[in-house]
Each structure stands twice: as C-alpha cells, then as structure tokens.
C-alpha cells in the first residue's frame, strides 16, 4: 500500500502508542467520507483535539495544510476505487475457491468454506466494523484488505497481541481471531476464552476448529506445505473482499 489512506490505516493500527495521532487516524477511517466536507474546526471537535493537532497530523503524513491533506486523500481513494473495480472484474468466486482447494493437503469441503464465508459477509453487512486479533505476522497480511474494506465503508481495527495480552476492551463490531495453525490460542488460552465470552460475533479463522466458543469458525485447510498457509489466508481475504464488493459495492 502506498496511498494516503494506507498511511492513515497504519497509524490507526499502531497499538504501541495511543496518542492524539492515533485517535485522529481512527476517526478518519471510521468517518471516511464525512470528513470530505468537514471543516478543520468541526474535525478537531469531533476528535476531541485541537486544530493544531489536526495540522500536526497532516504534516506528519506529508502535507502542509488540512485542505491539501483532504484533496490528496480523496484523490488517492478515487484511484484505489478504480483499482478495486478492475481487480474484482477479473476475480471469480469459483476460481478463488478452486485455488484454495489446490493447496489443501487432504480432501477439503470447499462448499462448507464458501458457506462460512458467506455467513461472514452477512455479519459484515450488519456490523460494518471488524476487529482482528492474533499473532503479528498474519495480521500484517491484512494491509491491502484493510484499505479496500475501509473504502467500502467497513473500518478494520488490528489488535496485534503479544503473549497473554489480548485486548479485551468492549469494542463494537465483529471480532476475528486469526491463528492459522492454532498456536496463538494455545499460548493465550485464558485471554482467548475471555474474548469469546465478552463479545458477540466472534469469528475464528484457523486450521483448528472451535464451534463451541465462537459464533463462526471459518476453517482453513491444512496445506501441502506450511509455506502455503499465508497464500491460502490471502486468497480467503480476497474472497471475502470480492463477495462483499459484489453484494454491497463501493457505497460512494
């Protein structure tokens, strides 16, 4: 990602320092299209910061003024929309599912996966917000997905979770726990269970199964080689994004 929005998303996903810059970034991705006509004064009031903080934020990502920032933000969004439309025009639900099945180590019911993902799409349509939890590297693969879903009106929040420190804040939306092999849950069992019990709409995206503690288990196939796990994960994210685009469109 190399757009203005991608920089903002990276700042919103910074879990190390929750300062004014992080708060401003989070507000932007949650109210993306509202700020297009919003004055800097109203923007600052809505973020509970000063106009000086808004200007500092703009300068931090390379712009001298709020006006210049907004112009470049929405120009880059228009470009990204064109790219998303072009990409989705070449995608196909059946082909994506077949690609996923090609990497499967054993017989895998691709139809069940498709039903699980369509269930997830319905949750997204209802909640319009997704929180991802898990190990650092798999969450790092969310960058492109985060940008395109934000453009389609679904802000993505990433909670990169060190050992035994799962973020248990009562956040609204869908809560997706990403653990390709299940090791994250093994190392954070207590926090994982607390997260499941504390929230509605908890989704597990993993090779392991847990239908008892989660509302939805998107089961990823075991691959012919562990090096392919990330490829399957990205294909599943592409399928989610594609199906949501086909059902909802760009909304703007």
Image: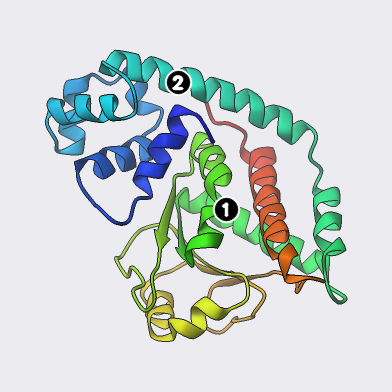
Tag 2 and tag 1, C-beta contact below 8 Å = no
**In this picture, is 47 found above or below 121?**
above
Identify the residue at horizontal 61%, vertical 53% (top origin).
Answer: 121
Q: Residue 217 placed where, x, y %?
A: 62, 72
Q: Residue 67 placed where, x, y %?
A: 30, 14
Name the side, left or right, on which 179 lies relative to 127.
right
Circle on res. 141: 1
What quarter of the picture does the N terminus occupy? top right
> Secondary structure under badge 1?
loop
What crowding class fits label 2: few (fewer than 14 Cα within 10 Å), some (14-19), or many (20 or more)? some
Q: Nearer the viewer, mark 2 or mark 1?
A: 1
Name the side, left or right, on which 139 lies relative to 237.
left
**In this picture, is 1 found above or below 171?**
above
**In this picture, is 42 found above or below 91?**
above
Circle on res. 219: none
Given residues 22 and 38, the one toward you in this image is: 22
Q: CA distance from mark 2 to mark 1?
A: 24 Å
> Secondary structure under badge 2?
helix
Question: Badge 2 is on which residue?
Answer: 74
Q: Residue 5 placed where, x, y %?
A: 44, 32
Name the side, left or right, on which 36 lies relative to 85.
left
Given residues 227 and 154, the one toward you in this image is: 227
**In this picture, is 147 found above or below 226?**
above
Image colouring? rainbow
Identify the residue at horizontal 67%, vertical 54% (top origin).
Answer: 234
- Which of disc 1 and disc 2 is earlier in sequence? 2
**Picture quadrant of residue 48:** top left
Identify the residue at horizontal 57%, vertical 21% (top origin).
Answer: 79
Identify the residue at horizontal 56%, vertical 38% (top origin).
Answer: 148
**Picture quadrant of residue 83:** top right
């Amino acid at each position: 990602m190399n757009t203005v929005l991608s920089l903002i998303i990276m700042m919103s996903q910074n879990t190390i320092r929750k300062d004014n810059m992080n708060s401003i970034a989070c507000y932007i991705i949650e109210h993306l299209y509202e700020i297009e006509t919003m004055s800097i004064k109203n923007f600052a009031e809505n973020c509970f910061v000063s106009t000086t903080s808004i200007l500092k934020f703009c300068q931090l990502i390379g712009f001298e003024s709020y006006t210049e920032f907004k112009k470049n933000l929405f120009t880059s969004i228009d470009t990204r929309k064109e790219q998303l439309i072009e990409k989705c025009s070449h995608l196909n639900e059946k082909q994506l599912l077949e690609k996923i099945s090609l990497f499967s180590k054993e017989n895998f019911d691709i139809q069940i996966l498709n039903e699980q993902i369509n269930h997830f799409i319905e949750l997204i349509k209802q909640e319009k917000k997704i929180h991802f939890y898990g190990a650092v590297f798999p969450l790092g693969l969310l960058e492109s997905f985060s940008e395109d879903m934000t453009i389609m009106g679904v802000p993505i929040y990433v909670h990169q979770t060190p050992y035994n420190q799962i973020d248990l804040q009562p956040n609204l939306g869908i809560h997706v726990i990403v653990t390709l092999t299940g090791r994250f849950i093994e190392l954070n069992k207590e926090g994982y269970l607390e997260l499941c019990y504390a929230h509605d709409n908890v989704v597990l995206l993993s090779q392991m199964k847990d239908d008892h503690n989660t509302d939805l288990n998107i089961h990823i196939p075991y691959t012919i080689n562990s090096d392919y796990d990330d490829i399957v994960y990205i294909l599943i994210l592409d399928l989610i994004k594609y199906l949501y685009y086909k059902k909802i469109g760009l909304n703007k």
